[in-house]
Amino acid sequence: MTQRVKVILNPITGRPNGTAKIAKIELALQQAQLDYSLVVTEYPQHGIELARQAVLEGWPMIAAAGGDGTVNEVVNGIMQIDEDESDKPTLGIIPTGTANDLAAMLQLPKDIQGACQRLAVGESKLIDVGQVNDYFFVNNSAVGLESVVTVTQQKMRWIKGIFSYIVAATGSILTAKNWEVQVDWPSGCYEGPAILVSVGNSARTGGVFYMTPEAVVDDGLLDFVYGAGMSRWRMVTLLPRLLRGSHISHSMVIYRKTKQLKITTSPPTPIQADGEIIDHEATEISYTIIPKKLQVII
């Protein structure tokens, strides 16, 4: 049976760009013999609107062609329509961004042709969806330094690719400060200085950083990690350990799993969700997990 799929493409993420990217994806969709309709995002969060419309039009599959931010927009568009899991469309991913973290964690092909072939096969599974305040995410969210790194990386024009995340992280650490936070979850709490709180539905963020290395996308839990009162030098020495996830064994790093999490910060902090800044000055942040909520192509 031919798969019907609505493709929502962000033309400005990764490479190739613009017209060349559209042509390459359309060719791969045709070679995979998919019954498709392709639309292009034109401004930030346009993908949310396009995904909502695709749900209302009854498309059985909606594919995000772009990076993690594009995936996030499509997920939010799907999740905003109040339907049972059995009626929600399946999420597909054609990874053309820089990090492509969720696609990597789902072990999807890195190339466009291979990803489109996976859409045609149609094998899928249910994964959890995280929620931060009134916004959804599927891979990772954070407050504090990690969000500052996201802001810094997005402003960088002189360096591209995965290396930009490492440069942004190093630069942000050198000017880092601690936030005063209160972190509450059902089995514990912490009050005091913290450099960041990172919350993962999946293990990797920023293409290289395994902030929550034990996170699993379908276990019904959010993993979270925070560093209590670290100096800048301590953070610099921990940075290489983030690349392999071994930071969670450090005595100043706390790693937990939960279904709910509340954070209060002073001063305000940005919030990032799947690599996108959704709030620049938050002081009250609430996280929850919605188990087995979204069908995803694997």
Image (spheres, rainbow, N blue to C red):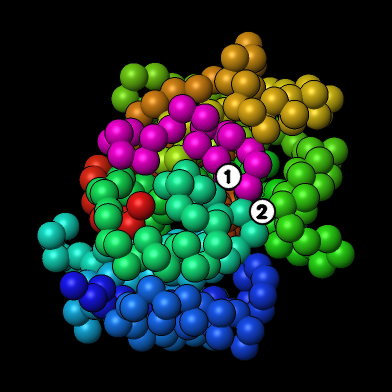
Q: Earlier in the sequence, mark 2 or mark 1?
A: 2
Residue 138, compared with residue 15, is above or below; it is above
The stretch drawn in magenta includes residue 216: yes
Q: Mark 1 packing: few (<14 Cα in 10 Å), some, or many (20+)?
A: many
Q: Provide the secondary structure element on which disc 2 rests.
A: helix
- Taking the spot 22% from the left edge, 84% from the top edge, the residue there is 57
Camera-side residue of 47 and 145: 47
Residue on which disc 2 sits:
150
Q: Is residue 132 visible?
A: no
Quadrant (top left/top right/bottom left/bottom right) for the N terminus: bottom left
What's the magenta region? 203-222
Expressed as whole percent of the image width and height from the top left, the position of residue 134 reads 36, 57
> Which residue: 36% across, 47% down?
130
Image quadrant where residue 4 sits: bottom left
Outermost front residue:
31
Secondary element at tag 1? loop
Q: Which residue is mark 1?
A: 205
Disc sitting over residue 285 in the figure:
none
The image quarter in which residue 82 lies: bottom left
Q: Position of residue 46 (x, y in %)?
A: 47, 79
Label 1 sits on what residue type?
A: Thr
x%, y% of residue 169? 75, 43
